[in-house]
Every structure is written in structure tokens, then in C-alpha cells.
Image (tube, rainbow, N blue to C red):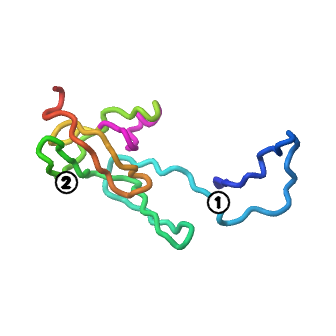
Amino acid sequence: MSVWHGDSHKKKLSGGRKRVNRKKRRFERGSFPTETSLGERKLKISRRRGGNLKTRALSEKEANISDPSSGKTERTEILRVVRNPANVDYDRRGVITKGTVIETKLGLAQVTSRSGQAGIVNAILKSEKPGT
């Protein structure tokens, strides 16, 4: 079953139910969230409305880490997912979403991009060394 963004489930202002006057349309269809995991880089490209393409990261092993003190950005390997505040289940499974704290060779970093929608992992360095 697919995700659908129609509004026939809503009620009228009077409180009555809306009657379905047409079938579902293709432009109303959505998609399930892409849960980016740690692993070999794997992307999925899907067509969106207006012919636009969305690149979704299914799994990723590297991240672009920005150091706010020096202003430099470096692509480095993700060692592990430390914490995901978005969802307890994501935390257990190691899913990478925006706000996830990851451990890299440069130190702990917080993900600032939506990798399931942007297809890339960008993060800001939180501390110099892991465990500090």
C-alpha cells in the first residue's frame, strides 16, 4: 500500500463527511521515508512532480564534515552512529537522519542534511576527539 496525500479523509466545515467524487490521482501519491543506514554507498533516484529527480541515500559510508572553527570541510568515513534523537527505534538500528550524532575519524559530528531526501550526508563537527 502506498502513501497518499489526498484530502478526502477530512471533514467538511459543518462537521459532515466528504463524499468521494473521484479516484486517486498520481500527483497525490507520496512515498515511504528513506531510512539511510551505514554501509556501502547506495542511492535511489526517483521521479517527482514536474519531472524533477530526487536522489535518496539508502546507505552511506562517508560524510562531508565541516569544522566551524577552521571553516574547512572534509569528506571522511563514518565509523558508527552514536545517537539519533529523532526516533528511539532509529537509534537502535543506526538510521541516519537530520540531527543524528555520528562518530568519524575527525571526532563526533551532527548531521545537518536530510540524507534520505538529499542523497548526501553533511555534518558539523561537535568535538575534536571522540569521548571528549
Height in image: 15 above or below 41? above
User: As shown in the figure, which amino acid type bears the numbered disc 1?
Assistant: Arg
Task: Using the rendered view, name the quadrant where residue 97 is placed.
Answer: top left
Q: Amino acid at mark 2?
A: Arg
Point out the stretch of residues depicted in magenta: 89-101
Residue 30 point in image, percent of width and height: 60, 57
Q: Quadrant of the C terminus?
A: top left
Instruction: Tell me which corner region of the image, top left, top right, bottom left or bottom right, holds residue 117.
Output: bottom left
For this view, does 16 lie left or right of residue 57? right
Based on the picture, tell me whether residue 93 belongs to the magenta stretch: yes
Q: Residue furthest front?
A: 13
Cβ–Cβ below 8 Å for labels 1 and 2? Answer: no
Counting every numbered tag in the picture gives 2
Q: Position of residue 1 (x, y in %)?
A: 67, 53
SS of the residue at dot 2?
strand
Decide whether residue 64 is among the magenta residues: no
**In the rendered image, which quarter is residue 111 located in?**
top left
User: Which of the labelled discs sits on residue 8, or is there none?
Assistant: none
Q: Which residue is mark 1?
A: 29
State which tag comes first along the sequence, 1 or 2: 1
For disc 2, the neighbor class at 10 Å (few under 14, some 14 to 19, many from 20) is few
Q: Is residue 64 above or below residue 130?
A: below
Relative to 101, is 38 above or below? below
Point 81% across, 44% down: residue: 11
Q: Residue at x 55, y 71 (%)?
A: 50
The answer to whether one can see residue 71 in this image is yes
State how far apart marks 1 and 2 are (Cα).
35 Å
Q: From the viewer's perspective, is 53 left or right of 107?
A: right
Please tell me which residue is depicted at 19% across the width and 54% down the height of the picture.
75
- Residue 85 in percent (x, y) is at 41, 32
Q: Which residue is mark 2?
A: 75
